[in-house]
Amino acid sequence: MILACHNLNKSFGERTIVKDGSFHIEEREKAAFVGVNGAGKSTILKMIMGEETPDGGTIILTKGKNIGYLAQQQNLESGNTIYEELRTAKADILSLEQQIRSIEKELKSLSGQELEARLETYHRLTSEFEVKNGYACESEIIGVLKGLGFQEDDFGRPADTLSGGQKTRVSLGKLLLTNPDILLLDEPTNHLDLNSISWLETYLLNYPGAVFIVSHDRFFLNRVVTKVIEIEHGQIRMYSGNYKAYSEKKKQIRDARMKEYLNQQKEISHQEAVIEKLRSFNREKSIKRAESREKMLNKIQIIEKPLDDVQEIHFSLEPSCISGNDVLSVEHLAKQYDGQILFDDVAFEIKRGEHVAIIGSNGTGKTTLLKILNGLTEADAGSFSLGTKVHIGYYDQEHHVLHDRKNIFEEISDDYPSLNNTMIRNTLAAFQFTGDDVFKLIGDLSGGEKGRVSLAKLMLSEANFLILDEPTNHLDITSKEILEQALNDYTGTVLYVSHDRYFINQTASRILELTGQTFVNYIGNYDYYLEKKEEADTHAASPADSKGTPKGAYFHTGRQSGENTAVDSASASKLSWLEQKEAQARERKRKNELKRTEESIALLEERNQEIDELMTHEEVYSNSVKCQELADEKAGNEARLEELYELWAKLED
């Protein structure tokens, strides 16, 4: 074990982050830390790093081990270039190399014992240099930079002029090069393209130390981790396996707990009904039975209802009208920046109802293409046209369509003046903005909050052609799943850019890969793309034809559903059907017998009331023979009623 957290407690005011939370990380283990946004994942990482103080509990790091931490926000103000910044991670090795080179210069002018002493130092330093893999140091730095998506032309760029995402990539590279015993990574795949994420997966799988990852990238977690630690409602639980195994196990546990809870509630309701019925019989024995059942009911240990997941966004996307079959046609489109060609002579078409994902490395022009289609940027050449009745809804990953000086309420009301106060508040509540939250300034919101405002506007737009730029950025896994469901239910057309492979797998029916300044077209989801990519990579990519279909690269899925004709399966199904029929027959018989029993009880009780009434009549109580007959009849009824009460209780149970 390299890291152990025992009985952690942390609160901010009345808000509990974690209560008596415990977990551990083994050496070389790759573990995920999951939970919805705001659950407290980053806070716990900061507690491990000593940046936050726990209210209670202990955090133990094995003696002699060190931690490397990647936070979500980075400040690089050293004045170094990208390459120089990464070289600082190997400062000890570079210092050794300088000492070795200095001694080499000295050796030429030394002799005798002084030479021997200096040679001894030289051999010691070179030996240490070799042990630390110093000769591969420069190639290791370059390999990490390229793996994280930096080109050699980028190496000389000043680090303090980079965007937030680029700074995070530089910081991640530095951290990986320091080789700590345990890596704490907070959203490491943010700002990485598909190739860089794939490279990072391989790097972490082969990493000799332990890794503890906060991430909402399900595809990444399925590939890398072997344990999932979950924080939910302040409670921490550990699950073995990758994210898929965790998700399935969690659902099983939750379903089992909910079933247990519902069964107990059903039994409590049943017992309360039986008690009430027994009391209604108003007989000494039935009242005693009721009291006995009541005591047993009071001793039951009540099962708490499983807590629902924290408040989720919930929405649906509905187009206001149906577009024509031809939604978008792109012809000979070209764009370059600062002399660098992004894409050239691009042509493709999108038909109504298609869900098309655009993928490719960072800097290839994916976002630029979306901006051209939305009229925010001019193309250098070529043209595009929208079909009949096509209305675009645009989701911008940088949220430039939002106005920083407006509050959330104004952002909606100004764009949709026909909505009244209640309608706007109801819409915002669906995206977790309630109470005074609606008056927060857009400029003060986090990336995730801005994303939710943009999604709210997208829902209200009723567009029939959605163009989305990285829609899952800053969304937690639960919110991603809700968006996936909304897009899959959407009857309009979707074109989006994403690096989220799981999201692409769930929502895309077609993939356009922007590579080599043109598009390669794959008809299928991400798994299908990977399969065909392997085949296509063995051949030179052919340019797209005038319809946007790359020659030799327009792949179709050929999935076939097999028929299950196994005899044992059919036999099992038949047996299950017979057992079900028998169980249904037994239940019908029980209900019929219960009904008959209740009817018999009612008749006998009614007859006993009649007898009691008759015994008050003079012609009856003055006739000893008649009195005896009625008394004997009532006694027989009472005996029979006792039997029926027993039978009724048995049938009810």
Image: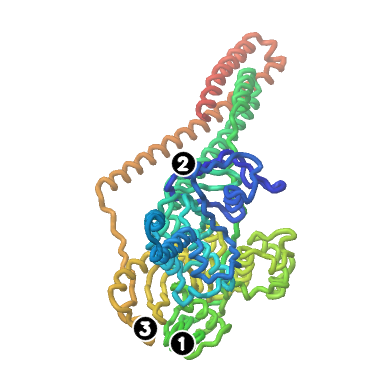
Residue 625 vs 294, above or below: the answer is above
Total residue callouts: 3
Give the CA distance from mark 2 to mark 1: 57 Å
**308 and 78: which is toward the camera:** 78
Residue 126, given in percent of the width and then of the height, sits at 38, 57
**335 and 531: which is toward the camera:** 335
Q: Residue at x 66, y 42 (%)?
A: 55
Asked if one can make out residue 495 in the rendered structure from this viewpoint, the answer is no
289 relative to 119 in the view: left or right: right
Residue 257, given in percent of the width and then of the height, sits at 52, 40
The residue carrying pointer 2 sits among few (fewer than 14), some (14 to 19) or many (20 or more) residues within 10 Å by Cα, namely few
Residue 516, given in percent of the width and then of the height, sits at 39, 80
The residue carrying pointer 3 sits among few (fewer than 14), some (14 to 19) or many (20 or more) residues within 10 Å by Cα, namely many
- Residue 60 is drawn in which quadrant? top right
Residue at the extreme left of the image, as rendered: 567
Residue 1 circle label: 2
633 relative to 520 in the view: left or right: right
Q: Which residue is drawn at 48% across and 48% down?
A: 228
- Residue 137 is drawn in which quadrant? bottom left
Name the residue type under label 2: Met
Give the CA distance from mark 1 to mark 3: 12 Å
146 relative to 268 in the view: left or right: left
- To which residue does mark 3 refer? 544
- To which residue does mark 1 refer? 333
Q: Which of marks 2 and 1 is nearer the N terminus?
A: 2
Label 1, secondary structure: give it: strand
